[in-house]
Image (cartoon, rainbow, N blue to C red):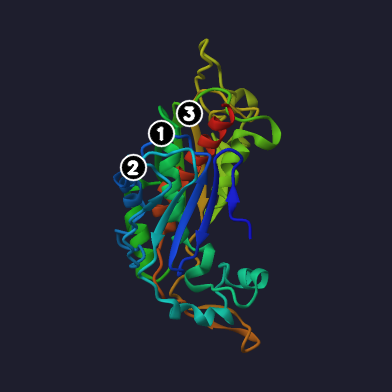
Amino acid sequence: MNNSIGEILRITIFGASHAGEVGITLEGVPAGILLSENLFASDLERRRPQLRGETPRREEDTPIIEGLDAECRTTGDAVTIRFRNNNRRSGDYSRFEHHPRPSHADLVQRRKYGEGYDISGGGMASGRMTVALVAAGVVAKQILRGVEFETRLTEVGGCADEAMFEAIIAEAAGQHDSVGGVVECRVSGVPYSLGEPFFDSAESVIAHMLFSVPGVKGVEFGDGFEGAKRRGSERNDMIINAEGATLTNNEGGVNGGITNGNDIVVRVAVKPTPSISLEQRTYDFERGEVAPLVVGGRHDACIARRAQVVVEAMVALSLAELRLREG
């Protein structure tokens, strides 16, 4: 099982939703970066379930940080950040071993890793794992001094009216259903020349990380799919000064795989939570037939809302990796 990524800033995620802990190890972090516990508080709070329609599972999410010196600074050696899992109900998931949830990873994980693989809470395919990604993103942001992030929901349940988002999520929750959403991350202060043509393009490095987030089903940069509907004369970005700034930013801050100094703009499609309390029909391997299934349990009606900070963390990790490659 390969749970690592990165050439310079190499991260390895470990644990599972209902294991004793989840966490992440970062290698290649430069020495001298302050990583006190309170530095993580804001981003971890953004991920924490708080609103109607969000999972009632509550964890303390206090980071246990290893690999720092006496002043809480990195030393150049690996940094590991752990989070305890204390609020677990593994018994809720045993039936999914023979009656896997639709659009979830229950079946594929057990087929790949064996019948002994623990799918409680979704195993490693759970949104619980994203607490470790958010923590890693905090470290990445400390590497990216001068880079600013603005992340927001731009669509929920097919609606782009922000004033309607809460009502749409509440309605889905009240009907024991779920809705998807679109998260936009805009990054300013990104330097020129990060990324390479082809396989290490800035877009491909960022997209690889984003598609690692549970529930992400689509990624686009700049005007994305909408740009495919327009003519070149309509969407080309006019360069307006010697610094390379452009009048528009349809390219999303990247030309030919290389950052151009304009804002990185990336949007992420997050699917509706597959675990819902409405009755569904799906194959039951014990009965040998399609049968009704009511999932129950503790789940978000719209995982896109809490995924905002996760998307931001993955973009930050990608840009930190690209910056460190530049030396």
When the figure is inspected, residue 41 is found, relative to residue 224, above or below; the finding is: below
Q: Position of residue 22 (x, y in %)?
A: 45, 60
Along the horizontal axis of the image, is 99 left or right of 43? right
Amino acid type, mark 2:
Ala
The reply to whether dot 1 and dot 3 touch (C-beta < 8 Å) is no
What distance separates the C-alpha of mark 1 from that of mark 3? 28 Å
Q: Label 1 crowding class (10 Å Cα cut-off): few <14, some 14-19, many 20+?
A: some
Q: Is residue 122 above or below residue 281?
A: above
Question: Seen from this angle, which residue lies furthest bottom?
Answer: 287
| Residue under numbered circle 1 | 32
* Residue topped by disc 3: 263
Label 2 neighbourhood size at 10 Å, few (<14), some (14-19), many (20+)?
A: few
Q: Which mark is residue 192?
A: none
* Circle 1: residue type: Gly
| Of marks 1 and 2, the one in the foreground | 2
Residue type (three-letter) at the residue carrying disc 3? Asp
Q: Which image quarter holds the N terminus?
A: bottom right
The residue that appears at 39% across and 66% down in the rendered structure is 85
Instruction: Please name the residue that numbered disc 2 is placed on.
Output: 70
Secondary element at image label 1 = loop
The mark nearer the N terminus, 1 or 2, is 1
Looking at the image, which is closer to me, 160 or 86? 86
